[in-house]
Amino acid sequence: MSAESDFSAEEMRVLRPLFLSSSDGYLKEIRRILALAAKRGALAADTLQTLHRAIHSLKGSAFQIGLAPIGDVAKVMEQVVLGLQVAGDGDPRVWTAALERGVAQLEANYEALRTEAELPPPDPALLAQLTQLAADLDAQGGGQEAVGS
């Protein structure tokens, strides 16, 4: 699973399906909102807040049971969304593509969990891209903190 997990293999066998069933809704909500953004080209503030909550909850659930590869991707995705809340939507093509790459990484991790395989580490290029995008958005927003962060 993860070298950072404080749980035994037996505990992880119990926690893995619980994580999948409880967090699958978050992943579906993230996908739904990204599809909406791709279609509309912009998102309302309340929709960005819903996206933030879904990613934040997924991140917390993953880190809580030591699934760092999932938590690490969700963490940088969350930073992008927080930047969007402050700076505005920017170019939706850029951030939706980046977040969709994050979702693809999360889906690969979910598949590994379902088959009890080792979680693939986050793609360093993806993490770098999302981190840079979050920094760019933060700079556009003047370093303000997003509401609800």
Image: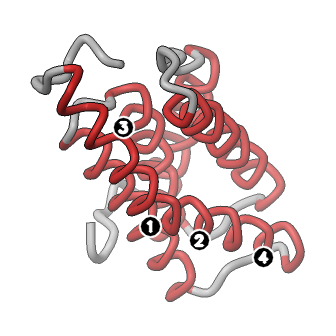
Q: Nearer the viewer, mark 2 or mark 4?
A: 2
Compute the Cα span from label 3 to label 4.
Answer: 24 Å
Of the pair 141 and 12, the residue shown nearer to us: 12
User: Mark 3 Cα within 10 Å, few/some/many (few <14, many 20+)?
Assistant: many
Work out whether mark 2 precedes mark 4 in sequence or the reverse, and give the earlier one. Answer: 2
Q: What's the distance in space between the residues labelled 2 and 1, CA to CA?
A: 7 Å
The residue singled out by tag 2 in the image is 29
Q: Secondary structure at mark 1?
A: helix
The circle on residue 54 is 1
Q: Position of residue 79 (x, y in %)?
A: 42, 49
> In percent of the image, x 50 and y 88: which residue is there?
46
* Dot placed on the residue nearer the N-terminal end, 2 or 1: 2
Q: Which residue is mark 4?
A: 36
What colouring does the structure picture have?
secondary structure
Residue 92 appears left or right of 137: right
Give the mark nearest the N terminus, 1 or 4.
Answer: 4
Residue 2: image location, x then y, percent: 31, 17
Q: Residues within 10 Å of mark 4 (few under 14, many from 20)?
A: some
User: Quadrant where the N terminus lies?
Assistant: top left
The image shows residue 64, relative to residue 58, as above or below, that is above
- The amino acid marked with disc number 3 is Gly
Q: Are marks 2 and 1 in contact (CB under 8 Å)?
A: yes
**Circles 3, 4 touching at the beta carbon (< 8 Å):** no
Give the Cα distance between marks 2 and 3. Answer: 17 Å
Q: Residue furthest right?
A: 39
Q: Nearer the viewer, residue 109 or 141?
A: 109
Question: Which three-letter amino acid code belongs to the residue tagged 2?
Answer: Glu
* Amino acid at pointer 4: Leu
